[in-house]
Amino acid sequence: MTWSLRPGHWTVVVMNSNGDPGVAADVDVGVKVKFLVPLMWGLLGGGLLLLLIAVGLILGGVLHRGEAGAAPPPEGAAVVDESVVHAYPLRLEGHLDSSLSRWRWLVKWFLAIPHFIVLMFLWIAFGVLTVVAWFAILFTGRYPRGIFDFNVGVLRWTWRVGFYATSVLGTDEYPPFSLAASDGPATLDVVYPEHLSRGLVLVKSWLLAIPHLLIVAMFTSGAIAARQRGGAGIGLLGLLVLIAVVTLLFTRRYPRGVFDFVLGVNRWIYRVVAYVALMTDEYPPFRLDQGPVEPPAIGAVPTVME
């Protein structure tokens, strides 16, 4: 007796005792389950329904928040017109801890894993809502305030996690799980635009932003690094942060000059992200504004309204 086996198909040959050919039988083995295809379509439909519900809840939440508006300042409080004070509508700042742990940076990426998981879903919502905002700007010239506040919150959350665990490593203070502004070492805000160009929305995210996108790729993706065949490179930002934390490990000091430069690189990157996400019509400057504090506009004087 001999056997020939292929997946789902058996061939059995039975030989007579004198060696003459015997009986050969081809046997196909399989299982037919009729409900698998309906089950697959049912799961797919259920998943799409849940996705639509989730997007609807997000939209409802952020639009409701936008209609509610910000609370008015207390009577008699001084209000600074920050859109006049600062050089660009996006304001990114970060303050270096004076007593950074020399070794904790080795595990911060691990400690920040819960943030990475939440941010993954937040950035999916960010992308969906930016598409909604694109249509709103195209037809109305306005960025829906609720969506704008949500997207600023995503940028703010991302910057705090980056300052703690990845793109700066400048603090040991664990970032909060919040879209709202906070008094922590890393802050970010974007001035809300009362009106946006309906024509620019068609081209600024991809065509006009190309020069800046190439620079951001150099900062982050290793385009400046020498690469061997199939080798991985390290971007300018990653290289600077690596130099800083290795110096911290051996000297207990984060080099201040490197910190200021790293803040300038991050500031450039986030300005480009805000522009690509349609949050401003003001073209990002080709300028590395270094240091922990956002620079003021050239010739601008802070305006305080009582």
Image (tube, grey):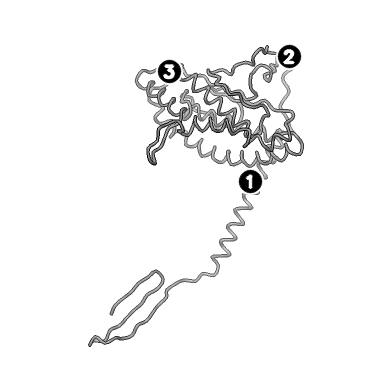
Residue beneath disc 2: 305
Q: Residue at x 62, y 31 (%)?
A: 274
Residue beneath disc 1: 54
Whole-percent x, y for residue 52 in the image: 65, 49
Residue 85 placement: quadrant: top right
Whole-percent x, y for residue 20 in the image: 26, 87
Residue 84 placement: quadrant: top right
What amino acid is labelled 1 in the image?
Answer: Ala
Q: In this view, does 227 lie above or below 9?
A: above
CA gap, disc 2 to disc 3? 39 Å
Q: Which of marks 1 and 2 is nearer the N terminus?
A: 1
* Mark 1 Cα-neighbour bin, 10 Å: few <14, some 14–19, many ≥20: few
Determine whether the residue tagged by mark 2 lies in a helix, strand or loop.
Answer: strand
Front disc: 2 or 3: 3
What amino acid is labelled 3 in the image?
Answer: Pro
What amino acid is labelled 2 in the image?
Answer: Met
Q: Which residue is drawn at 75% across and 16% down?
A: 75
Front disc: 1 or 2: 2
Q: Earlier in the sequence, mark 3 or mark 1?
A: 1
Q: Residue at x 57, y 30 (%)?
A: 212
Q: Quadrant of the N terminus?
A: bottom left
